[in-house]
Amino acid sequence: MEIINVLGKPCPIPVIEAKKALRKAVPGETVRVLVDNDVSRQNLEKMAAGQGFASAFEVQGDGNVLVSITATAGTAAPAALSGGQGFVAAIGKNTMGAGDDELGAILIKGFIYSLTEMDAPPETLLFFNSGVWLTTEGSNVIGDLKTLEAKGTVISSCGTCLDFYKLKDKLAVGNVTNMYAIASAMADAAKVINL
């Protein structure tokens, strides 16, 4: 199999590209991924171990790392790589984590993109407080949110929050909801990821 070159690609792209290739791999087939940093190597190895796949790596003469992941017999790749059914992600900020907002914006974009690559995307995405900025005109995640919506994910933004930020007429994806509906969706979910 050819080498997947993800040199210079930020997290989570190396793992996502490896998963895509593994979905198509037959048992015993090896997927090779070329990365340029040790964090990507570690992330690929963790993903492989978590899915029951064997992995190895080799540092190249130029310092890049070639990671080999072998799809093992008896491991159904699509099922093993799925995120599970019925989960809800509640997003209350337009950044991810605490600390630097520029980094937080990069992380939330990577998180939402990662959701588009899951075999079982979230059932619902709930946006409230400054999280509603992500569903409105000018957001750099609208394309990914529309991809999720096309896959069946319900995308809902808090109407009170949209009003507060004067964004109601700028909603670019999904629908307007209320806090009771948000609370109900979270209460009924098999699993809630709260950001």
Image (cartoon, helix red, strand yellow):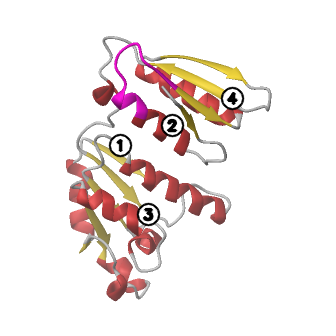
Going by the image, does 118 lie left or right of 69? left
Task: Name the residue beneath numbered marker 1.
Answer: 118
The answer to whether the residue labelled 4 contacts the one labelled 2, judged by CB atoms less than 8 Å apart, is no
Q: Residue 65: which disc?
A: 4
Task: Categorize mark 3 by other alpha carbons within 10 Å: few (<14), some (14-19), many (20+).
Answer: some
Q: Point out the frontmost of discs 4 and 3.
A: 4
User: Would residue 173 be counted in the magenta stretch?
Assistant: no
Helix, strand or loop at disc 2?
A: helix
Q: Is residue 139 left or right of residue 82?
A: right
Q: Is residue 29 magenta?
A: yes
Image location of residue 29, percent across then percent down: 42, 17
- In the image, which residues are magenta? 21-31
Three-letter code for the amino acid on which mark 1 is drawn: Met
Please identify, in this view, whether the residue under mark 3 or under mark 2 is nearer the observer: 2
Real-space CA distance between mark 4 and mark 1, rounded to the nearest whole angstrom? 25 Å
Q: What is the crowding at mark 1: few (fewer than 14 residues within 10 Å), some, or many (at least 20)?
A: some
Q: CA distance from mark 3 to mark 2?
A: 26 Å
> What amino acid is found at the position of numbered circle 4 in the picture?
Val
Which residue is tagged 3? 92
Q: Can I make out residue 131 in this image?
A: yes
At label 3, the amino acid type is Gly
Q: Measuring from the top left, give residue 180's x and y in whole percent.
A: 22, 66
Badges 4 and 1: C-beta atoms under 8 Å apart?
Answer: no
Q: Which numbered disc flags the more N-terminal residue, 2 or 1?
A: 2
Establish if 163 lies above or below 146: below
Q: Earlier in the sequence, mark 4 or mark 1?
A: 4
The residue lying toward the viewer, choosing from 140 and 157, is 140
In space, the residues marked 1 and 3 are separated at their CA atoms by 21 Å
In three-dimensional space, the C-alpha distance between marks 2 and 1, rounded to whole angstroms, equals 11 Å
Q: Earlier in the sequence, mark 1 or mark 3?
A: 3
